[in-house]
Image (cartoon, rainbow, N blue to C red):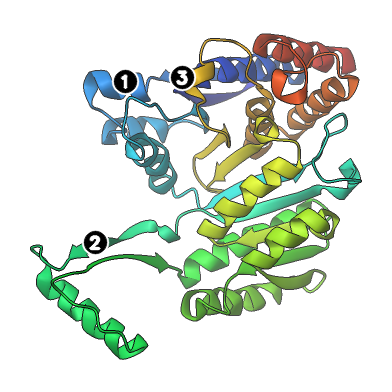
Amino acid sequence: MKQGYKIAVIRGDGIGAEILSEGEKVLEAVSELEDFELEWIEYPHGAEHYLMTRELMGEDTLKELERCDAIYFGSIGDPRVEPGVLEQGILLTLRFYFDQYVNLRPVKLLEGVRTPLAGKRPEDIDFSVVRENTEDFYVGIGGRVKGNGKKRDELEIERKLYNIKFGLDIETDADELAYQIGVVTRAGCERVMKFAFELARSKGKKKVTSVDKANVLTHSYGLWREIFNEVARAYPEMDTEFNFVDAICMWLVKNPEWYQVVVTPNMFGDIITDLGAMIQGGLGLAPGANINPDGVSMFEPIHGSAPKYKGKGISNPVATIWAGAMLLETVGEKSASEKVLDAIEAVLKEGKVRTYDLGGNSKTSEVGDAIVSEIRRQD
């Protein structure tokens, strides 16, 4: 009997449906060659569903998704819905419910793709960013307090604390405060750091770089540093180093070849992975994975829903197809995953089929067809 996998499909908004269709097409092709089966289970969640039903991601749906082997996600975001509603109610709900504590982003310049970094070649840009995905400033602890509002007593406490620490004189009746609290736990740090070291070991890498801002945010990221040093002791074959987040943004542009595996708290990882997407050729080439090694993981392109391109069939599906390759590797189909990535690179290197963002005029479906043909040709 063939090995089978249940894959939840959430197409989402904008270009999500068309790019995810190409991912399904490619994964179906490689599954036939590698002799396993994929069962696609559709879920309607996104802007249209929300506007019709006011449902985001309910408990019953989440329990259904628990029975799947992985989630394949298109994109989220629609101008008809206030920013943050869909992102928090669907995407972040999935990440937190399934405790997908690793956001994994390969930053790899493929053959045939131009980077904006002068003189850099594919061998110079090939590293992974392991971003902690459930803590830091994304836990939602914070608020806003107005001096003349219902929370005047709270503001008075804040005012006194600020005055003591900074020698200020904030007038309660005239001012407003907003605050956001970042949370860093020992358990959260340990597990994402162990994942980073194990990833480095599995990929034959020899160096892990930790990112923080411990020179300013001394309490939370001081703990991050301490735990990184503790975890690193279990991997004596690995070289380790610390980078402040502002410094790594400079060095990723100047010397990306220096990096192999980077592990970072949530907010800083959010920032530097977008930088990574640009140096590897653009958002259309940037896949992402939200991983729980012992649970249900979710795979998606890191770009948005691009509503103005919806239905035009010109968007680049490579990031989504590459995310599908990551899905296959995570469920245990490593050979199939490698075939997909090899085919992506072969098509890009040949250069005959490419979308507008890469200087071509090919349709979304033509890119998917070309990758499928290359998979079959290589086999």
Q: Quadrant of the C terminus?
A: top right
Name the quadrant containing residue 87.
Answer: top left
Q: How many other residues sit within 10 Å of disc 2, few (<14), some (14-19) or many (≥20)?
A: few
How many numbered marks, from 0 up? 3
- SS class of the residue under badge 1? helix
Which residue carries the number 2 mark?
Answer: 144
Residue type, label 1 = His
Q: Which mark is residue 345?
A: none
Query: How far apart are the two marked residues, 1 and 3, measured between alpha carbons?
Result: 16 Å
- SS class of the residue under badge 3? strand
Residue 124's x, y, as percent?
87, 49
Residue 69's x, y, as percent?
52, 32
Lower sequence index among marks 3 and 2: 3
Vertical comparison of 185 with 205: above or below: below
Q: Is residue 227 left or right of residue 86?
A: right
- SS class of the residue under badge 2? strand
Which residue carries the number 3 mark?
Answer: 41
Q: Residue at x 81, y 17 (%)?
A: 375
Q: Looking at the image, is mark 3 or mark 2 nearer the viewer?
A: 2
- Of 161 and 131, nearer the camera is 161
Q: Residue at x 38, y 25 (%)?
A: 46
Which residue carries the number 1 mark?
Answer: 49
Q: Is residue 111 left or right of residue 26?
A: right
Lower sequence index among marks 1 and 3: 3
Residue type, label 2 = Arg
Residues at discs 1 and 2 in contact (Cβ within 8 Å): no
Q: Is residue 26 visible?
A: yes
Name the quadrant containing residue 348.
Answer: top right
Vertical comparison of 124 with 7: above or below: below
Q: Looking at the image, is mark 1 or mark 3 nearer the viewer?
A: 1
Q: Residue at x 41, y 67 (%)?
A: 183
Residue type, label 3 = Ile
